[in-house]
Structures are given as structure tokens and as C-alpha cells.
């Protein structure tokens, strides 16, 4: 019996999601040819002892999100069971443009009580996710979307999915109003202390890290007050699939005593990189393999908030080790994300060598005081099918921006003008005063969203289009 079979039974005993069976275990994918139902619903979630109304995305077997198999069809009936219009974007997939799931690009939101069918071929495996492309994302309208690799079906390893989120008892509309309204009146002093800048004065510049103070940071819907505890085999192998589904928070993953091997970013394989800490900005995914030692023990897998002491996470528990309480607050602020790791990543399957047929410059700018953000390209990003496109993103603002291109996987080919064959991915961080160049083969026609994955930056102007002509 393989470990994953053995652990199916164990997993059922580990309560996880408030609305159903365990996500982070071996939920069986359904028939490749069959249509899977996926419901957008409203649910209540207890956070810090208080009840909140949030969204849920529930697939077959009442598990959050979906599991599908590479090489088969993505064949999903999305059912809006809420009382308001909604839609879901398949982050990391490369569907035909009308199936991308961004409102009015080109299809409208799905009305309350209505359904929409999606069907297209999945060409490659990967750790992806799905989320509302609207303010509903803040209310936890997000879930894992795991595309299994049939070639890995026999691997002797246990899979653990971790979806990170940031949570506020305030609505996204209220959070946005605090960001824009208060500032627009000219005051730096936000009521409730929700605005926070951090002086990184070493370089003589003030860099802004977090613009929202959340009430909680969640890993699979739970805080460290009552974390998910995943039963694992003593000496077992675990593949962590970590998804940063937070609306406006970057984290550093801390494996504690374990050494992990990072094998994929944004679902795309890389030349493995070993380490104990790995940065993950909004929208990104990390696949990390860990080998557990041959004694019963407890291994917290933590996510440290960037620039803050808050942390969240899950716990791997091997054998009969007992789980001690882990504080949700660390002694020190989490690291500020940079491009050190990004510069070390090498794609396992780089884009074919080719000269760019079109190049663009894209400036990222923003005015914290007015809370207005912008993406301005030197010329409109207009491409033709068959182009090798290179885009150099230059961040002229004092916040870092996780830039996400829909409908494609791009390769990171330069940082600050220094070329290297970096990771293939779909979301890359551009820190203040840095530049990142991406290369992408234009072969999926549409008018694709290209934006900052910080939700409040996106809705305040940090959105453009990667547009195919005709
Ligand atoms: Cu941004």
C-alpha cells in the first residue's frame, strides 16, 4: 500500500475545513471525462472566536476547490449559489480567453443562482488556484486548483495543500474606502491605525510594506490558535503545495527544522533549490518537497507576514508526537521580500531560445498619499500571435508589486538588466526601484489582464491589457 492510500484514512480523522473534509490530503480527482460541479457559496467561518460571513468554493466531495488531471479536459459547471453576481478566475491555467473568468473580459459576471460551463484542455500539471477577480476575493472567494501530473501518480509522497489568506472583519469596500478616502482628505493619520508604512531607512528611502492591518492570517481557513494538524508517516516524504491567496499580504515560508527542496514555482518546474525559508508574494505558489526524519515529531510549516510579527501555518505531525501551542506572533518581523531567490531560480523547461519580436517597457508607479496606482507602458502592449514578447517592468513606486499576466506562462529573463534563464511562472514580484524583464510567447489570443496582484492596487489603477491585434 502506498503512503497516500494509507493516509487517506488518517486524514479523515483530522478535522480541517469548517465546511467539509480535509483539503490538504489526497482528495480523489473525479473521472477525467466527467463534468465537475463547483459551487460559489456563502458560509460562516469562526475567526478569533468571532463568526464572519465569507465565501466558499466547494467542488466534488465537498472539498474546497478542484483537482483535475493534466491531459484531460477542464470540464466544470460553476454554480453561483450566492445572492450576488460573481465569477471565478482560474489563476495559472491558460484557457481560451472567454473562459478566463474576469468580469466583462469578455463574459459578464455570473448572476445569483446562475451557472456557467467551462470546458477546455489542460496541457500541463501544476499547483494553481482560483479566485474572484473582484473585491469578493478578500472575503475568501479563493480555493486551490491542483492539476495532477499522471506521471506522478505512483510517487511515494504525501501531498499537503496550504492556502494562505489575510482576513479582516471589515468588508473589502470598507478597507478600500479607508485606503482611498482617508488619504484623499490629505491626512496621514488613518483612523484605527490601518495604514502602516515602515521606514527602511538603510538606503535612505522609505519603503511601504503593508497598507492594511488584518485581523487574522489564515492557513486553510485557520489561525495558529487552532491550526490544521496533518498526520504524516514517520520518515515520510511530503510535497507541500503552498498558495498565497492573500489579497494584500506577502509571506516568507519557514520550514523550521526541515530542509525543503523547492521544485516548482507557480506550478512550473525549476531546477530544485534547497532551503528552509522561501518568499511567496500574492498570487504565487511554491511546491516544496520535504523528507521527514525517522522519529516521531511535530513540524510547524509557518508563513511569516512580511514586515510584521504575525504568522500563520499548519502542523505536520508524524507518529504519536504531541502538538504544542504555537504563538501566532513571532519575536521579530517577517523578512522583507526581495529578488535574491528569484535570481537563483532556473526553469527546468525554459522557453526555446529566440530573439524578441516585440519589446515593451512598463512603468509601475503610485501615489501612496492619493492611493492611486498605475501601469504605463511606453507603447500600448499590442502583440500578434507567434510573437516572442519581452516586457521590462520598472517599479518607480515605494511598494513592491506582484505582477500577474493572465493566459500565459512567462519566463523571467532579466533582473535590473542582468540577463539569466530564470523561472517560468505567471506572477513575479517587482520590488521598489527594481526592474524585472519577462519573456512570453504569444500564442493564446485575447485581451488578457496584466496587473498587480495586490487587490487594492489592482482596483486603484494597477491594471493593463496584454492585447492581441485582431
Ligand atoms: Cu501593487
Image (cartoon, rainbow, N blue to C red):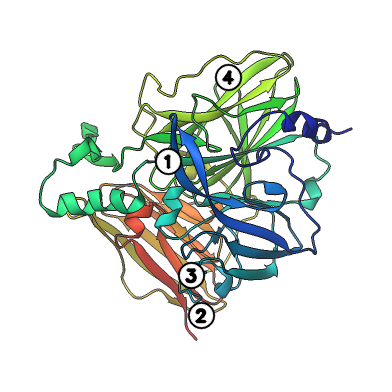
Image-based side of 414 in relation to 25, left or right: left
Nearer to us: label 1 or label 3 = 3
What residue is rendered at 30% in x and 61% in y? 363
What residue is rendered at 33% in x and 75% in y? 379
Sort mark 3 into few (<14), some (14-19) or many (20+) by Cα contacts within 10 Å.
some
Tag 1 near tag 4, CB within 8 Å? no
Tag 2 near tag 1, CB within 8 Å? no
Establish whether ligand 1 lies closer than 8 Å to the Cβ of label 1: no
Label 2: which residue?
384
Sort mark 2 into few (<14), some (14-19) or many (20+) by Cα contacts within 10 Å.
some
Question: Which one is nearer the viewer's eye here, 443 or 318?
Answer: 318
Q: Earlier in the sequence, mark 2 or mark 3?
A: 3
Q: Which mark is residue 166?
A: 1
Tag 4 near tag 3, CB within 8 Å? no
SS label for mark 1: strand
Image-based side of 85 in relation to 171, left or right: right
Q: Earlier in the sequence, mark 4 or mark 3?
A: 3
Q: Earlier in the sequence, mark 2 or mark 1?
A: 1
Q: Earlier in the sequence, mark 1 or mark 4?
A: 1
Nearer to us: label 2 or label 1 = 1
**Mark 2 → mark 3, Cα distance in angstroms:** 28 Å
Establish whether ligand 1 lies closer than 8 Å to the Cβ of label 2: no
Establish whether ligand 1 lies closer than 8 Å to the Cβ of label 4: no
Question: Which one is nearer the viewer's eye here, 450 or 69?
Answer: 69
Label 3: which residue?
109
Compared to 121, does 199 lie above or below?
A: above
Amino acid at each position: 500500500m502506498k503512503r497516500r492510500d494509507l493516509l487517506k484514512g488518517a486524514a479523515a480523522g483530522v478535522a480541517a475545513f469548517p465546511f467539509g473534509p480535509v483539503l490538504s490530503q489526497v482528495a480523489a480527482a473525479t473521472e477525467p471525462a466527467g463534468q465537475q460541479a463547483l459551487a460559489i457559496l456563502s458560509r460562516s467561518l469562526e475567526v478569533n472566536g468571532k463568526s464572519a460571513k465569507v465565501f466558499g468554493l466547494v467542488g466534488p466531495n465537498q472539498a474546497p476547490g478542484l483537482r483535475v488531471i493534466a491531459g484531460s479536459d477542464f470540464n466544470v459547471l460553476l454554480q453561483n449559489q450566492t445572492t450576488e453576481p460573481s465569477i471565478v478566475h482560474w489563476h495559472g491555467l491558460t484557457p481560451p480567453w472567454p473562459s478566463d473568468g474576469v468580469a466583462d473580459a469578455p463574459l459578464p459576471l455570473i448572476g445569483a443562482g446562475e451557472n456557467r460551463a467551462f470546458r477546455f484542455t489542460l496541457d500541463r500539471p501544476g499547483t494553481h488556484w482560483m479566485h474572484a477577480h473582484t473585491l469578493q476575493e478578500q472575503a475568501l472567494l479563493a480555493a486551490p486548483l491542483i492539476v495532477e501530473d499522471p506521471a506522478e501518480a505512483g510517487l511515494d509522497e504525501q501531498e499537503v495543500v496550504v492556502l494562505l489568506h489575510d482576513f479582516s472583519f471589515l468588508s473589502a469596500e470598507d478597507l478600500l474606502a479607508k485606503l482611498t478616502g482617508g488619504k484623499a482628505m490629505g491626512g496621514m493619520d488613518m483612523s484605527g491605525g490601518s495604514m502602516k508604512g515602515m521606514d527602511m531607512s538603510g538606503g535612505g528611502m522609505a519603503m511601504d510594506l503593508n497598507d492594511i492591518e488584518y485581523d487574522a492570517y489564515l492557513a486553510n481557513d485557520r489561525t495558529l490558535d487552532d491550526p490544521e494538524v496533518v498526520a504524516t508517516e514517520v520518515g515520510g516524504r511530503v510535497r507541500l503545495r503552498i498558495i498565497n491567496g492573500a489579497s494584500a499580504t506577502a509571506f516568507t515560508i519557514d520550514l523550521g527544522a526541515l530542509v525543503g527542496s523547492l521544485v516548482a514555482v507557480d506550478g512550473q518546474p525549476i531546477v530544485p533549490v534547497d532551503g528552509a525559508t522561501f518568499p511567496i508574494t500574492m498570487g504565487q505558489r511554491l511546491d516544496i518537497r520535504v523528507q521527514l526524519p525517522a522519529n516521531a515529531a511535530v513540524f510547524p510549516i509557518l508563513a511569516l507576514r512580511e514586515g510584521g510579527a504575525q504568522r500563520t501555518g499548519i502542523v505536520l505531525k508524524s507518529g504519536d508526537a504531541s502538538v504544542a501551542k504555537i504563538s501566532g506572533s513571532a519575536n521579530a518581523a517577517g523578512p522583507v521580500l526581495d529578488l535574491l531567490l528569484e535570481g537563483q531560480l532556473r526553469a527546468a523547461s525554459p522557453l526555446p531560445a529566440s530573439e524578441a519580436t516585440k519589446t515593451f517597457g512598463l512603468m509601475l508607479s503610485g501615489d501612496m498619499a492619493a492611493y492611486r496606482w498605475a501601469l504605463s507602458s511606453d507603447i500600448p502592449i499590442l502583440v500578434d500571435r507567434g510573437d516572442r514578447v519581452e516586457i521590462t517592468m520598472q517599479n518607480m513606486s515605494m511598494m513592491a508589486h506582484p505582477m500577474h499576466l493572465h493566459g500565459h506562462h512567462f519566463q523571467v529573463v532579466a533582473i535590473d538588466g542582468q540577463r539569466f534563464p530564470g523561472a517560468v511562472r505567471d506572477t513575479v514580484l517587482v520590488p521598489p526601484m527594481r526592474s524585472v524583464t519577462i519573456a512570453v510567447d504569444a500564442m493564446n489570443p485575447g485581451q488578457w489582464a496584466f496587473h498587480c496582484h495586490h487587490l487594492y492596487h489592482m482596483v486603484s489603477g494597477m491594471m493593463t491589457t496584454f492585447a492581441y491585434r485582431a
